[in-house]
C-alpha cells in the first residue's frame, strides 16, 4: 500500500485537482454557457500563491505555515470572484462559440501578461514556492476534503431554486426569461462560482507543483478541461469528476508506451466524442446503478 | 512618427495581415457552411509548413524517428508550396471524414465537434513531434530565387526598406484572395456553397450534393491553412510543432473581429490585426500578441456581430 502511494501519490493528487477543474467548467455549463476561462483563473490563483508566498509573507524555517495558505486561498477566491463578475457581465451577453472565444482571449491575455510582467517572473516563472507539508502526499489532506466539499455544494446547488433556474436557462434562455428568471444574474453567478473554484485549485496547485509559470493554464489546458466534462458527461456533476480523474490519469498511465502517448490521447478524445456523445456518466446510468 | 517609418510599419502590417486574412478565411468558410469552428486549423497550418520544408529538399534534424530524413528529390519552392498546400487540403478532408462526419451524421452538439477537432489537432501536432522532433527549422534564404534581401521603396537618403519575403507573401495572399473571391461569386461550386451557407436543407432539396461540397470546403480550408503556414515560416521559421496553435488562436480573433462566417470580414479583420501589431512600439513587443485579443474584446463589447456582420435577432 505504501509503495502504491509512493508511486502514484502525485498522480492521485493531480487527478483530484483535475476533477475540480472539470467541475469549474461544468458550473457555467449548467446554465448552458461554454466558458473556457477556467485556465485563466487557475493561472491567476497560482500566481497569487507564488507571489505572496515567495515575496510577501515572511520566510520561516521548516514548513510553510498553513494559515498563510489559507489567506492565499481566500484572497484568490475573492480576486477571482471580483474579476469573474466584471468579466461575466461583459461577456455573458454572448452565446455559444462567441463566449468560448471571448474566454479563450481572456486566458491568452492573462498568459501574455504573465510572460511580460516583472512580478510574475517573466518567461522563467517563479521557483521555490514553499511547501506546507513535509511529504507531498500530505496534499491529499487538502485535495480529498476539498473535492468532497465542492461535489457536495454542486449537488446541493442542483437541488435548489438556483440550480433549477440554471437548468431552465440551459434548456431555453428566452423561455426562462419570460418566466421571470433574471438569466444574466444566474449566468454570472454560475460563471463566477466556476472561476472561484479554478482560482482556488490554482493556488493549491502552485504549492503542490513548487513552481509556477506562464505555461500553466494555456489554451490547450482549457480544451483538456472541457474534454473532462464532455467525455465524463455534462448532464450530471459526477461526469466531470469522473472525466477529470480519468483523463488526468490516462496520459500518465500511457507513459509506459512512451512518445506516442499524446497521439493516443488525441485519438481517444476523438473516439470518445464520437462514441460517447453524452459522456460516460449519464443521469440514466446513475439511475440504473441506484436500482 | 516620421513618415518613412510609418510607411515601413504599414507595409509590414499589410504583409502579415494578408496572411492572417487567408488563414482566417479557412476558418470562416467551414463556419459558414457547418456553423462549427475547426480547432485543428492551426495544426494544419503547422503541417503545411513541414510539408513544404520536406518537399523543398530540407533535411530534418536528429530528433524524432525520422532523424536526418530527407526526400530523395527536391522540388522548386513554388512547386513545393503548391503541393504541400494540396496535401494539407487532403489531410483536412481526411480529418473531416474521421472526426467531423460521424458527429454530423448524428446531429451531435456543436461543442462535441469542437472537442473532437481539438483531439485531432493534438494527434497532428504530436505526430509531427514524434516524427521529426521539436527543433526549429529555417528555410534557406534563397528559396524565392536570388532576390535581394530587401527592396528600398524610399530614396537613397530616406530609405524605406521592405523585406522581399514580405512583398512576396503579400503578393501570394492577394492572388489567393482574388481566386477565392472568383470561385465563390462566379462559379457553380461557389453558388452552391452560398446556397448551403444560407440553408442546408433547402439546398439539398434543390439537388445540391451537400456532402461533396462540404468536402470541397474542407479541402479549400486546409489548402489555405497549409499555404499560410508555409508563407509565415518562409518569412520567419518553423518554430516547432506547436507554432500553429497560437497562430490558430489569433485566427479566431480575426474571424470574430470581422464577423463569424463573413468572407470580407475575415480579410478586413486580418489586415486590421496585422496593421495594429505592426505599430506596436518595439519596447512593448512582448505584448504584441495581446493586441489581437484586446481588439477582440473591444469588438465583442461594442459590436458582437463583428465589423461586417449582420445583427441577428434571437427568435423563439
Image (cartoon, rainbow, N blue to C red):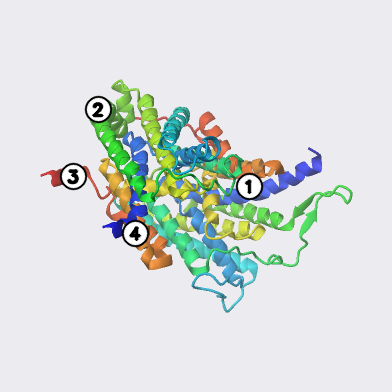
Disc marking residue B17: 1
Of tags 2 and 4, the one toward the viewer is 4
- Judge by depth and name the residue closer to the eye, A225 or B139: A225
- Judge by depth and name the residue closer to the eye, B156 or A104: A104
Disc 2 and disc 1 on one polypeptide chain: no
- Residue, disc 4: A7
Badge 3 local density, few (<14 within 10 Å), some, or many (20+)?
Answer: few
Disc 4 and disc 1 on one polypeptide chain: no
Residue at x 36%, y 62% (from the top left corner): A254
Parent chain of label 1? B
Given the current orientation, which residue lies at the most extreme bottom position? B72
Given the current orientation, which residue lies at the most extreme right position? B157
Separation of marks 3 and 2 at Cα, in angstroms: 20 Å
Query: Who comes first in sequence, dot 2 or dot 4?
Result: 4
Q: Look at the picture and state if B270 lies above or below B188.
A: above
Q: Secondary structure at mark 4?
A: helix
Disc 2 and disc 4 on one polypeptide chain: yes
Q: Position of residue A73 (x, y in %)?
A: 42, 35
Disc marking residue B161: none
Q: Look at the picture and state if B124 lies above or below A226.
A: below
Q: Position of residue B42 (x, y in %)?
A: 51, 54
Badge 4 local density, few (<14 within 10 Å), some, or many (20+)?
Answer: few
Residue at x 34%, y 60% (from the top left corner): A253
Parent chain of label 4? A
Tag 1 near tag 3, CB within 8 Å: no
Separation of marks 2 and 1 at Cα, in angstroms: 50 Å
Separation of marks 4 and 1 at Cα, in angstroms: 50 Å
- Residue, disc 3: A286
Q: Is residue A27 visible?
A: yes
Parent chain of label 3? A
- Residue, disc 2: A160
Disc 4 and disc 3 on one polypeptide chain: yes
Amino acid at each position: 500500500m505504501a509503495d502504491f502511494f509512493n508511486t502514484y501519490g502525485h498522480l492521485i493528487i493531480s487527478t483530484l485537482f483535475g476533477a475540480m477543474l472539470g467541475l469549474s467548467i461544468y458550473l457555467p455549463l449548467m446554465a448552458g454557457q461554454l466558458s473556457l476561462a477556467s485556465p485563466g483563473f487557475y493561472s491567476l490563483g497560482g500566481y497569487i500563491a507564488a507571489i505572496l508566498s515567495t515575496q510577501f509573507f515572511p520566510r520561516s524555517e521548516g514548513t510553510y505555515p498553513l494559515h498563510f495558505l489559507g489567506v492565499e486561498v481566500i484572497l484568490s477566491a475573492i480576486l477571482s470572484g471580483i474579476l469573474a463578475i466584471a468579466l461575466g457581465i461583459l461577456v455573458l451577453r454572448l452565446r455559444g462559440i462567441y463566449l468560448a472565444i471571448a474566454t479563450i482571449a481572456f486566458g491568452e491575455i492573462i498568459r501574455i501578461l504573465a510572460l511580460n510582467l516583472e512580478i510574475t517572473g517573466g518567461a522563467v516563472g517563479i521557483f521555490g514556492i514553499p511547501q506546507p507539508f513535509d511529504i507531498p502526499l500530505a496534499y491529499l489532506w487538502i485535495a480529498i476534503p476539498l473535492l468532497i466539499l465542492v461535489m457536495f455544494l454542486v449537488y446541493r446547488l442542483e437541488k435548489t431554486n438556483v440550480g433549477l433556474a440554471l437548468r431552465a436557462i440551459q434548456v431555453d434562455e428566452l423561455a426562462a426569461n419570460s418566466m421571470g428568471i433574471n438569466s444574466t444574474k444566474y449566468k454570472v453567478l454560475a460563471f463566477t462560482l466556476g472561476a472561484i473554484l479554478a482560482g482556488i485549485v490554482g493556488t493549491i496547485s502552485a504549492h503542490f507543483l513548487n513552481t509556477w509559470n506562464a505555461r500553466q493554464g494555456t489554451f490547450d489546458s482549457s480544451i483538456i478541461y472541457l474534454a473532462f466534462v464532455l467525455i465524463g458527461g455534462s448532464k450530471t456533476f459526477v461526469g466531470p469528476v469522473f472525466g477529470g480523474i480519468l483523463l488526468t490519469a490516462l496520459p500518465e498511465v500511457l507513459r509506459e508506451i512512451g512518445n506516442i502517448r499524446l497521439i493516443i490521447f488525441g485519438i481517444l478524445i476523438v473516439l470518445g466524442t464520437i462514441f460517447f456523445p453524452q459522456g460516460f456518466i449519464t443521469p440514466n446510468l446513475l439511475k440504473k446503478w441506484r436500482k | 512618427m516620421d513618415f518613412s517609418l510609418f510607411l515601413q510599419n504599414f507595409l509590414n502590417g499589410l504583409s502579415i495581415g494578408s496572411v492572417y486574412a487567408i488563414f482566417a478565411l479557412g476558418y470562416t468558410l467551414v463556419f459558414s457552411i457547418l456553423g462549427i469552428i475547426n480547432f485543428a486549423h492551426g495544426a494544419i497550418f503547422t503541417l503545411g509548413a513541414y510539408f513544404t520544408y520536406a518537399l523543398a529538399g530540407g533535411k530534418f534534424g536528429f530528433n524524432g524517428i525520422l532523424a536526418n530524413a530527407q526526400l530523395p528529390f527536391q522540388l522548386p519552392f513554388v512547386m513545393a508550396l503548391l503541393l504541400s498546400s494540396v496535401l494539407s487540403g487532403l489531410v483536412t478532408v481526411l480529418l473531416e471524414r474521421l472526426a467531423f462526419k460521424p458527429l454530423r451524421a448524428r446531429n451531435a452538439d456543436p461543442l462535441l465537434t469542437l472537442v473532437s477537432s481539438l483531439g485531432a489537432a493534438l494527434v497532428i501536432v504530436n505526430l509531427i513531434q514524434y516524427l521529426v522532433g521539436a527543433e526549429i527549422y529555417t528555410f534557406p534564404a534563397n528559396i524565392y530565387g536570388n532576390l535581394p534581401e530587401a527592396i528600398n521603396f524610399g530614396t537613397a537618403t530616406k530609405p524605406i526598406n521592405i523585406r522581399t519575403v514580405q512583398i512576396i507573401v503579400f503578393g501570394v495572399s492577394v492572388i489567393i484572395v482574388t481566386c477565392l473571391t472568383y470561385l465563390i461569386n462566379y462559379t457553380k461550386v461557389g453558388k452552391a456553397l452560398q446556397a448551403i451557407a444560407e440553408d442546408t436543407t433547402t439546398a439539398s432539396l434543390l439537388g445540391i450534393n451537400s456532402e461533396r461540397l462540404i468536402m470541397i470546403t474542407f479541402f479549400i480550408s486546409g489548402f489555405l491553412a497549409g499555404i499560410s503556414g508555409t508563407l509565415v515560416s518562409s518569412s520567419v521559421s518553423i518554430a516547432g510543432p506547436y507554432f500553429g496553435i497560437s497562430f490558430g488562436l489569433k485566427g479566431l480573433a480575426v474571424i470574430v473581429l470581422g464577423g463569424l462566417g463573413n468572407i470580407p470580414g475575415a480579410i478586413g479583420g486580418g489586415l486590421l490585426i496585422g496593421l495594429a501589431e505592426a505599430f506596436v512600439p518595439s519596447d512593448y513587443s512582448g505584448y504584441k500578441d495581446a493586441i489581437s485579443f484586446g481588439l477582440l474584446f473591444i469588438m465583442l463589447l461594442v459590436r458582437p456581430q463583428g465589423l461586417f456582420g449582420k445583427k441577428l435577432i434571437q427568435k423563439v
